[in-house]
Image (cartoon, rainbow, N blue to C red):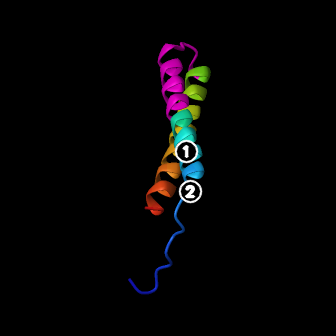
Amino acid sequence: MQGQAQQPQLTATNLKVLIDQMNHEAIATKKCEFYSSLLGDPALKGMAATLSQHHREHYDKLFNYLNSHQ
């Protein structure tokens, strides 16, 4: 397509780092969701839910970056 710059390809090392970081973000999201479900204090429950959303957003950004380099 005209007008669109070609994204540089990811190296194998960069791809591994990106996938590792995505895995860490996914695990952090699940942990925060789990803790949020266990906590009784509304303030702590809200904090865990906020952290879960934060990690989900990081995962989504990494996923979008990965997809933009295919």
Q: Mark 2 belongs to which amino acid?
A: Thr
Q: Are marks 1 and 2 in contact (CB under 8 Å)?
A: no
The percent position of residue 39, horizontal first and vertical second, equals 54, 14
Report the magenta residues as a range: 26-42
Q: Residue visible at 50% across and 13% down?
A: 38
Q: Residue visible at 59% across and 49% down?
A: 13
Residue 16 circle label:
1
Q: Quadrant of the C terminus?
A: bottom left
Residue 48 circle label:
none
Q: Which residue is mark 2?
A: 11
Q: Residue visible at 47% across and 18% down?
A: 37
On screen, 45 above or below 17? above
On screen, 36 above or below 52? above
Q: CA distance from mark 1 to mark 2?
A: 9 Å
On screen, 8 above or below 29? below
Magenta span dominant secondary structure: helix
Q: Is residue 33 magenta?
A: yes
Q: Is residue 20 magenta?
A: no
The percent position of residue 24, horizontal first and vertical second, equals 56, 33
* Left or right, residue 43 beside residue 64: right
Query: Foreground residue, 39 or 29?
Result: 29
Q: Quadrant of the N terminus?
A: bottom left
